Image (cartoon, grey):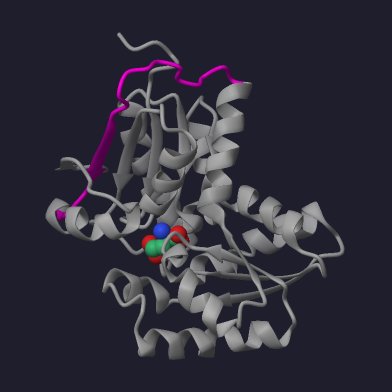
């Protein structure tokens, strides 16, 4: 039987995007076993109501709990924004979302306290990043913009296309005219657009990858709860999805930056 240290970290997302967070976790915490769940049958979450996202979150959490995880990382910005409390209530375990780590990293980075936030419609409408930034620093001025076309563009593999650059300029121009010096990439997919976003913001803005910030937080939480895996055995990373494992496997490589192992389909919810 696995010791409490050897138990996996549970990570979930609405679909494939959370693999950017797994990538950051693998880099920062290479000894950890991970169980990932992507709700590919019900993605996207970002355009759905908070109530529906909260219902889906119950099922996602139940699935990870059934895998006997030692902590839960909510990789999805939309879930972190509107349903983190659902996970916290259900799981008697350490839990983190991506909003607080991302907001902390932005406050740490900004020099002029003018911070941009981009994300799905659900994340932006929830004001979760804005509220957290203001809680951390009353002097922060926050400019938010939903960028709903970014998710499908990334899933099409259109990271380096002229059309993507034009759309990015359209979305980001209002933020750059506000003289932001820091921009939170508040969606799992946006780290894959870092190059194009840096181009259209003319390299003048520090880009905050909430996934990377979250991996650092996970490391501190593991230490705080004495859960870090110190075993020298090769760690095990397992992937589960609620639909289309083949597509997840092929597109997932772009997000993870390397080949995925076996991806299994599971049925969750009612
Ligand atoms: N994972 C979602 C997020 O970070 C993006 C995709 C979706 O809309 O479900 O908000």
Residue at 32%, 26% in the rendered image: 235
Tell me the quarter of the picture where residue 94 sits: top right
- Boundaries of the magenta span: 225-244
Q: Is residue 63 above or below residue 244?
A: above
Look at the image and say whether residue 226 sits in the magenta stretch: yes
Q: Nearer the viewer, residue 83 or 193?
A: 193
Prevailing secondary structure of the magenta residues = loop
Look at the image and say whether residue 267 sits in the magenta stretch: no
Observer able to see residue 106: yes
Q: Nearer the viewer, residue 213 or 231?
A: 231
Q: Is residue 17 above or below residue 259?
A: below
* Ligand 1 location (quadrant): bottom left
Residue 203 at x, y = what percent? Answer: 61, 77
Looking at the rendered image, the quarter that the N terminus falls into is top left
Residue at 34%, 42% in the rendered image: 59
Residue 26 at x, y = what percent? Answer: 41, 39
Observer able to see residue 147: no
């Amino acid at each position: 039987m696995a010791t409490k240290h050897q138990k996996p970290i549970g990570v979930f997302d609405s679909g494939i995007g959370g693999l950017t967070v797994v990538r950051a976790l693998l880099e920062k915490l290479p000894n950890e076993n991970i169980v990932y769940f992507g709700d590919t049958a019900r993605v996207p979450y970002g355009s759905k109501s908070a109530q529906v996202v909260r219902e889906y979150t119950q099922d996602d959490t139940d699935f990870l709990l059934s895998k006997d995880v030692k902590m839960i990382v909510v990789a999805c910005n939309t879930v972190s924004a509107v349903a983190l409390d659902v996970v916290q209530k259900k799981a008697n375990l350490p839990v983190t979302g991506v909003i607080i780590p991302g907001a902390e990293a932005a406050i740490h980075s900004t020099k002029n306290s003018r911070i941009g936030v981009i994300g799905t419609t659900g994340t932006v409408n929830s004001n979760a990043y804005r509220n957290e930034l203001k809680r951390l620093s009353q002097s922060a001025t926050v400019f938010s913009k939903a960028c709903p076309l970014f998710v499908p563009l990334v899933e099409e593999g259109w990271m380096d296309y002229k059309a993507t650059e034009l759309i990015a300029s359209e979305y980001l121009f209002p933020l750059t005219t506000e003289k932001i010096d820091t921009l939170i990439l508040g969606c799992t997919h946006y780290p894959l657009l870092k190059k194009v976003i840096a181009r259209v913001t003319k390299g003048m803005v520090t880009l905050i990858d909430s996934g990377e910030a979250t991996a650092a937080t996970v490391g501190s939480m593991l230490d705080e709860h004495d859960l870090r895996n110190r075993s020298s055995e090769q760690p095990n990373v397992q992937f589960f999805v609620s639909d289309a494992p083949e597509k997840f496997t092929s597109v997932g490589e772009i997000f993870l930056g390397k080949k995925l192992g076996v991806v299994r389909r599971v049925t969750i919810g009612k």
